Structures are given as structure tokens and as C-alpha cells.
Image (cartoon, rainbow, N blue to C red):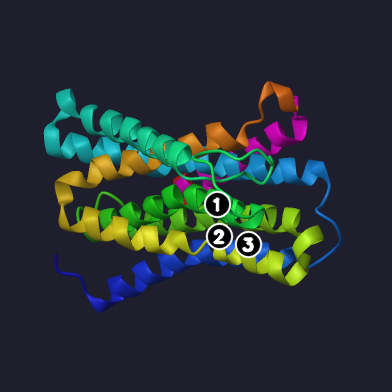
Amino acid sequence: MNVDPAQIGYAALIIAIPFLGTVLGSLLSLLGKGSGPRWLQQALYGFAGGVMVSASFFSLLMPSLEESNAQLGASLSWIPPVVGFLVGILFLYLLDVLVPHIHPKDSTQEGRSSSMSREGLLFLAMTIHNIPEGLAVGVAIASFLTSGSMSLMSALVIGIGIALQNFPEGLAVALPLREKKGKGKSCLYGILSGVVEPLAAILACLLAAYVEPVLPYALSFAAGAMIYVVVEEMIPSKEEGHSNILVLSFAVGFALMMALDVALG
């Protein structure tokens, strides 16, 4: 694969943008007091969920279908998206079952039992959460660099979209920790929760770029992993009750990402 220095620079920028979103969201937690009102936390999760679902469809599954059609023809083009999507779901499910963690909205430990502190378990939860987002950015860059099925602007849109949902995510990690850990440490936890994302992006980019037939599977794999996070974590259960603000903010996130992808991609 021949890549000129300018393309490497673009790739580095796209990888950095989502992490910047996490940093800015975490820094916002330094303002105000307490852990924030419940409606704000619901709005943050709803917006992030809308962005992730929209990005999964418009930025990942559709390019996966297009790439599959070019490689296999129309009659078999459904295979890589379906297989990749289901494997992505299974991958996140296994992480969810095996890795000890707790989510910001819940104090119940999931995964294998562990004596780790609540802060450590929360950090692991957000690490799991950020892996599929990093994969999405990485395979988008690989698609731009190799097959050309995704333009530079489309890959940039995915980076911006992930940054948009990382902004409330960084805040959502830091806010629940402020009362016990203070503003400085809670902000640091929020920032560190996003470190795995650029690492996952680089790994996914290298794999998909140098093994081009894997690209449609990689795109749909990232989509499946992101959808798992949305359904498992961001959509409230019946026990939590219904939330109009979550639904409305979900719609705003979905529409905004769709507009960015269609208008700029």
C-alpha cells in the first residue's frame, strides 16, 4: 500500500479529533457543582446514542455494502455486512461478559467478579465503550487510503461524529465521580477513558488497510460493536422508566450525524 505523507497527516488528524471530543467533555466537568441533574445525563446519553446509530448505518454499513458489491457482486454482497455485524455484536458481548466493569448509570458490577475500585471498574466500562468507536474511525481511514470507497471528507465526518458523541461521553464519565474524587481527578478519569480509542483506530486501520478483502467485514464489525453499546447501555430499561428527553436528544444526535454524513460525505 503506497501512502503519501499528506494522507498520513490526514489520518493522524482524523484519529486525534475523537479523542479531542473526550478531552473537551471531561474539561467541562470542571464547571459547576455536584454530579449534574438527571435530565442532563439522559440527554447526553440520548445524543451520543443517536450519533452512534446514525454513524453505524450511514458511515459504516452502507460503505460495507458498497465495498462488498464491488468485491463479490450483487448476489453475494450481503454476506460481509451481515457476518461482520454479527461478529461485532458477539465481540462486544464477550467483552461485556468477561471484563469486570460498572456503567456510569449503575453501581452493579458486570463481567467477572473483581475487587477493583469503583473508579477502576468505571474506567474499564468506558474502555469497552470506546473500542468500537476507535474501530469505526480506523476502518474509515483504511477505506479512504486503500479502496477509495470512502472519501477523505467521509472519513473526516466519522471522526467528527465520534467526537460529537465523545464530548457528552467524557462529561458523563467525569460527572458521577466529582463528589468523591474532586474535579481534578474526575476530569482526569474522563480524559483517560478515551485513550484506548486512538489505539483501537490505529490497529483497525493497519489491519483493514493491508488486508483489503477484510474491509467490508471490518466496517460492519465496527457497526455491530457500536450498536451493541447503544442497545446495552444507552437505551433505558423499563425499570428505569421512560424518558422523553432521552428520546428527543437521541433524535437530534441521529439527525445531526445524518446531515453531516449526507451533506459532507
SS at circle 2? loop
Mark 3 neighbour class, 10 Å CA radius: few under 14, some 14 to 19, many 20 or more: many
How many marks the image carries: the answer is 3
Q: Which mark is residue 149?
A: none
Nearer-the-camera pick, 238 or 119? 119
Residue 226 x/y as whole percent: 46, 41
Q: Quadrant of the N terminus?
A: bottom left
Question: Height in image: 72 above or below 143?
Answer: above
**Residue placed at 68% from the left, 57% from the top?**
171
Give me the C-alpha separation between circle 3 and circle 1: 9 Å
Q: Residue furthest front?
A: 115
Lateral position of residue 206 relative to residue 9, left or right: left
Amino acid type, residue under disc 3 in the picture: Gly
Nearer-the-camera pick, 102 or 136? 102
Q: Which residues are magenta?
A: 241-261
Amino acid type, residue under disc 2 in the picture: Ser
Lateral position of residue 144 relative to residue 73, left or right: right
Residue on which disc 2 sits: 193
